[in-house]
Image (spheres, helix red, strand yellow):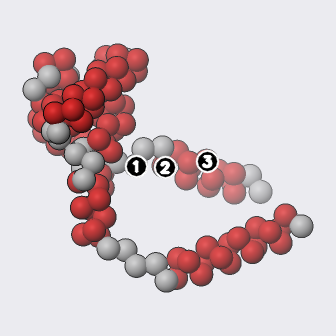
Amino acid sequence: MLQLVTSGALAAIVDIAEGLEVDVARMRVNLDATNGLIMAEAVTMALAQKIGKSDAHHLIEAASKQAITGRQHLRDVLTTNPKVTAHLGADRLAELFEPTAYQGASQALIDRLLASLDDK
């Protein structure tokens, strides 16, 4: 029964994916509309390597709130924060704010899926 349900779900996904058109320019506009907040996780992870996860989380959370209330880009808020710039320079921050370069946990999930297939 599970295989039948899985097969039906997969067939539906294929139907959806075949008609999918990616509007790269519109996707970029949507990403930019967040004023960099969508990349807060990437910056947090990079900063956590330098100052620890908890401190990085609190620092980026405060900066995100500042960006929202000041209607600023998160990158601009962070580049003026000495607690951040002591560990991440302007070039590194620019890299971290490039959405196409950040995969988050997706690579770990892909690796786990591929490993599970090898087990079968």
Disc number lying in front (2 or 3): 2
Disc number lying in front (3 or 1): 1
- Estimate the x, y position of residue 31 in percent, counting from the top left: 29, 55
Residue appearing at x 68%, y 78% in the figure: 11
Position of 26 with respect to 94 (left or right) is right
| Labels 3 and 1: the sequence-earlier one | 1
Name the residue that disc number 2 marks: 106
Label 2 is placed on what type of residue? Ser
| Labels 2 and 3: the sequence-earlier one | 2
Residue appearing at x 13%, y 36% in the figure: 76
- Estimate the x, y position of residue 50 in percent, counting from the top left: 30, 20
Kindly tell me whether residue 11 is visible in this rendering.
yes
Q: Residues within 10 Å of mark 2 (few under 14, many from 20)?
A: few
Kindly tell me whether residue 46 is visible in this rendering.
no
CA gap between label 2 and label 3 equals: 10 Å
What number is the disc on residue 103? 1
Label 1 is placed on what type of residue? Gln
Quarter of the image where one finds residue 15: bottom right
Q: Residues within 10 Å of mark 1 (few under 14, many from 20)?
A: few
CA gap between label 3 and label 1 equals: 15 Å
